[in-house]
Image: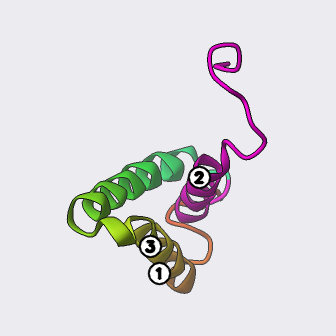
Amino acid sequence: MAGPLKAVSVGMGETVIITIFAIVIVGGVGSLKGAFIASILVGELNTFGVVFFPSFAMAFTYILVIAVLLTKPEGLFRIK
């Protein structure tokens, strides 16, 4: 939607897509409630990382994804 106002390039959405993929994995595929909770959790972890450990900010998201996949492979809230 911002294409006419800003410069559009090929890889401009990579970081957003990676974050969204992590949110879907953590929350559970197909779960709206899980995506909501996971987005708040990922946002808080990202903010914590930017404030206290700026060079490792994105690593906290990956650590969360790995921890959820090891403990609950279906995500926080799975659809029944």
Q: Give the magenta part as a residue range.
A: 1-29
Residue 67 picture location, percent across and down = 47, 81
Residue at the image point whose x is 27% and y is 70% from the top? 53
45 left or right, relative to 22: left
Residue 70 picture location, percent across and down = 54, 86
Whether 23 is among the magenta residues is yes
SS assignment at label 1: helix
Residue at the image point whose x is 72% and y is 29% from the top? 8
Whether 7 is among the magenta residues is yes
62 left or right, relative to 2: left
The disc labelled 3 sits on which kind of residue? Ala
SS assignment at label 3: helix
Say whether disc 2 or disc 3 marks the residue closer to the N-terminus: 2
User: Badge 2 local density, few (<14 within 10 Å), some, or many (20+)?
Assistant: few
Residue 55 picture location, percent across and down = 36, 70
User: Badge 3 local density, few (<14 within 10 Å), some, or many (20+)?
Assistant: some
Query: How far is mark 1 from mark 2, CA to CA?
Result: 21 Å
Residue at the image point whose x is 61% and y is 77% from the top? 73
Please tell me which residue lies in front, 76 or 23: 23
Q: How many marks?
A: 3
Extreme residue toward the left, this view: 52
Q: Which residue is mark 1?
A: 67
Disc assigned to residue 36: none
Say whether disc 1 or disc 3 marks the residue closer to the N-terminus: 3
Query: How far is mark 1 from mark 3, CA to CA?
Result: 12 Å
Query: How far is mark 2 from mark 3, CA to CA?
Result: 13 Å
- For the C terminus, the quadrant is bottom right
Q: Which residue is mark 3?
A: 59
The disc labelled 1 sits on which kind of residue? Ala
Q: Which residue is mark 2?
A: 15
